[in-house]
Amino acid sequence: MKKLNPDYVKDVTGLANQSPYFRHLGMVIAELGMGEALVELQPRDHHLQVYGNVHGGVIASLADTAIFWSCFAELDESVGITTVDLKVNYLAPVAEGMLKARGRRIRLGRTLGLGEAEIFNGDGKLVAHGTSSVIVLPAFGFPGNPKLPPKFL
């Protein structure tokens, strides 16, 4: 079984966490492992909709991101992925407190993958659940071809 290189994990999560959309939302990949990822976001005023709760689009972004990265970790370095679809069930409103999205790879084949995410509020209550399919794309690398350590040890 392949083992992720901790130096690669540090560099690739740093790259993702500094991307414009991550910075815009204020979300970060807090953990990345084989078949799993943890994405966190501390809601601010700009995340709230008119009723004072975190907008569903923010929750969907957390689910999508956690699932994406949980599948990404196992991929060969020569390929990439992108989301095909996303389904989110909203289970409870969230007004404040750290949000944590725990992504889990369910299955990853040569061309398609499936994952799920559970999103918890600051009290550990499940507030949303999502599923997503991803497609594996050959030669789909990071823009600018950043120099990264080997992905696997």
Image (cartoon, helix red, strand yellow):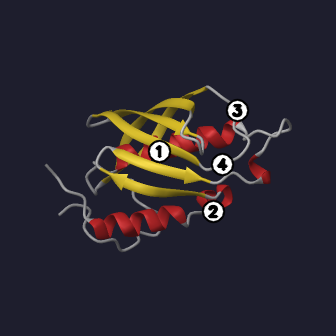
Amino acid, disc 1: Ala
Q: Which mark is residue 66?
A: 1
The mark closer to the camera, 2 or 4, is 4
- What residue did someone put label 2 on? 23
Q: Residue at x 64, y 54 (%)?
A: 42
- What residue did someone put label 4 on? 97
The reply to whether the C-beta atoms of the residues labelled 3 and 2 are less than 8 Å apart is no
The mark closer to the camera, 3 or 2, is 3
Q: Residue at x 28, y 56 (%)?
A: 78
Q: Secondary structure at mark 1?
A: helix
Residue 36 x/y as whole percent: 36, 45
Please tell me which residue lies in front, 127 or 106. Answer: 127
Sequence-earlier tag: 3 or 2: 2
Q: Please identify the quarter of the rendering in which residue 110 is found.
A: top left
- The quarter of the picture where the C terminus appears is bottom left
The reply to whether the C-beta atoms of the residues labelled 1 and 3 are less than 8 Å apart is no
The reply to whether the C-beta atoms of the residues labelled 2 and 4 are less than 8 Å apart is no
Q: Please identify the quarter of the rendering in which residue 54 is found.
A: top right
Residue 96 x/y as whole percent: 71, 46
Residue, far right: 50
Q: Which mark is residue 93?
A: 3
